[in-house]
């Protein structure tokens, strides 16, 4: 699978031998099953074994060139799955181990993937949508991508630290108290009233060119503003409308699933209002989310999405660009996660009480796995600048519904 005579392999081996020389093996005994899986897939040396990774693209002959790109492939039967036919006639899969987890391989055609990559960079990663770079830099209103395309040498200056800023004087108060408590309809008022001061810019940020900053673009908020400091939504900032392309796509993903087949026999606790999957075709309405931009060395550690008041309605997650290992387990890190290989165009839906608040993360972006249909610039020279960025990038667009349909948050 990996070329052991290559320079990258030799470098990874040298680094591994150096960093593990004095390793205390006892530490590993304390790792939870989720942590152990993260460590396994993060490892550069030896490269991770993917034979226990669910890779549904390997079932689809039309995806053969994607599977061979980069030489990373898992197995189609690495975890038990149940196939169903979506309303458009393609295959979808559920995992009996994690009720509510839906996999829609190749849900997006290559043209749609390109459209969404362009949308993420050109239209979305700019004001009024907040990005991680806005915290530290004074970005032009056209956004980092468009500034980079115009002139990669343009220098972007750090945000000044206002020493008398209100947020520096404020006591964080309940912030630490309620951090990590799952939101619900009963504690919504309390969450909504927590002070959400702007994140102070770092004091050691230096001016940087657009070319240097672009690989540091890590996220852009969608819809309701997510406040990263408190891990809660800041509803006082209002809701930026979800772009119609994203809304339509997420709704069509939700409508393509046979929810009765998924949940008819489910006996889990759906909370005070009971199960509502039978209405999702009609009333699922995405209103928040994140675009994640990963470079090949980036990871997303195990976490639970607890900030949405609705803990059951679908979270739709779209993969674009390089492939990744996605881990999803249970309600604690003690459950051994299922590793799933996600490729460009795949859609994952997390729904229902067992899945929506399950631990999940992305320990590895698989290098050199840009699908041939995204790497090809012969017929489309304008794509080449996107292709160059995507060579080392994975984009994930994930979209949620914050409030249950019957709940009035009282926000005007
Ligand atoms: O990148 C992914 O596939 C998952 C992203 C995610 O879990 C998140 O943003 O909360």
Image (cartoon, helix red, strand yellow):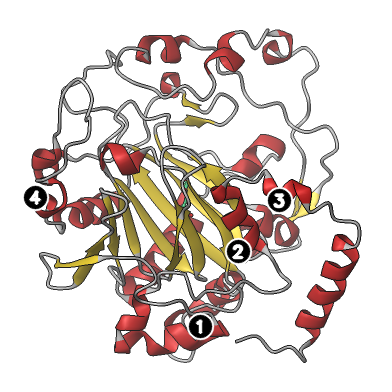
Between discs 3 and 2, the one toward the N terminus = 3
In this rendering, is residue 33 above or below 3? above
Name the residue carrying label 3: 28
Marks 4,1: beta carbons within 8 A = no
Between discs 4 and 1, the one toward the N terminus = 4
Disc 3 residue crowd, few under 14, some 14–19, many 20+, Cα 10 Å:
few
Q: Secondary structure at mark 1?
A: helix
As measured in the structure, the alpha-carbon distance from the residue carrying label 3 to the one carrying label 4 is 42 Å
| Quarter assignment of residue 272 | top left
Marks 3,4: beta carbons within 8 A = no
As measured in the structure, the alpha-carbon distance from the residue carrying label 4 to the one carrying label 1 is 39 Å
Q: Position of residue 44 (x, y in %)?
A: 71, 69
Disc 1 residue crowd, few under 14, some 14–19, many 20+, Cα 10 Å:
some
Between discs 3 and 4, the one toward the N terminus = 3
Q: Secondary structure at mark 3?
A: helix
Between discs 3 and 1, the one toward the N terminus = 3
Q: Is residue 42 left or right of residue 226?
A: right
Task: Look at discs 3 and 1 and give the one toward the viewer.
Answer: 3
Name the residue carrying label 4: 260
Q: Position of residue 104 (x, y in %)?
A: 27, 65
In this rendering, is residue 299 above or below 5? above
Q: Residue at x 77, y 43 (%)?
A: 157
Closer to the camera in the image, 326 or 148: 326
Name the residue carrying label 2: 41
In this rendering, is residue 213 above or below 174? below
Name the residue carrying label 1: 375
């Amino acid at each position: 699978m990996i070329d052991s005579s290559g320079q990258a392999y030799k470098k990874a081996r040298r680094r591994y031998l150096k960093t593990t020389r004095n390793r205390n093996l006892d530490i590993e005994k304390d790792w939870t099953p989720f942590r152990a899986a993260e460590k396994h897939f993060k490892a550069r040396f030896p490269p991770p074994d993917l034979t226990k990774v669910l890779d549904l693209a390997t079932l689809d002959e039309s995806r053969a060139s994607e599977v061979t790109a980069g030489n990373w492939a898992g197995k189609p039967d690495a975890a038990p799955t149940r196939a169903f036919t979506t309303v458009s006639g393609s295959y979808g899969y559920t995992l009996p181990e994690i009720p509510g987890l839906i996999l829609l391989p190749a849900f997006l055609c290559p043209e749609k993937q390109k459209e969404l990559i362009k949308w993420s960079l050109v239209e979305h990663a700019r004001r009024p949508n907040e990005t991680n770079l806005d915290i530290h830099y004074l970005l032009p209103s056209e956004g980092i991508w468009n500034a980079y395309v115009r002139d990669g040498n343009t220098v972007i200056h750090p945000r000044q630290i206002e020493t008398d800023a209100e947020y520096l004087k404020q006591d964080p108060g309940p912030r630490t108290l309620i951090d990590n408590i799952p939101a619900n309809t009963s504690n919504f008022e309390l969450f909504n009233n927590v002070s959400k001061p702007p994140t102070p810019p770092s004091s050691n940020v230096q001016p940087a060119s657009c070319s240097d900053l672009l690989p540091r673009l890590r996220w852009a908020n969608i819809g309701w503003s997510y406040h990263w400091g408190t891990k809660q939504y800041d509803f006082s900032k209002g809701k930026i409308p979800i772009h119609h392309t994203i809304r339509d796509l997420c709704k069509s993903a939700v409508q393509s699933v046979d929810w009765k087949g998924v949940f008819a026999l489910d006996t889990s606790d759906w909370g005070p209002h009971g199960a509502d999957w039978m209405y999702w075709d009609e009333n699922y309405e995405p209103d928040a989310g994140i675009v994640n931009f990963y470079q090949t060395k980036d990871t997303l550690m195990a976490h639970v999405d607890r900030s949405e008041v609705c803990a059951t309605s679908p979270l739709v997650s779209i993969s674009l660009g390089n492939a990744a290992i996605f881990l999803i387990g249970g309600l604690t890190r003690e459950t051994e996660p299922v590793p799933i290989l996600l490729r460009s165009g795949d859609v994952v839906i997390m729904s229902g009480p067992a899945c929506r608040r399950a631990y999940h993360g992305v320990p590895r972006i698989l290098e050199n796995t840009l699908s041939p249909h995204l790497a090809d610039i012969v017929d489309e020279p304008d794509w080449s600048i996107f292709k160059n960025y995507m060579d080392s990038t994975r984009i994930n667009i994930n979209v949620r519904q914050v409030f249950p349909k019957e709940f009035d948050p009282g926000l005007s």
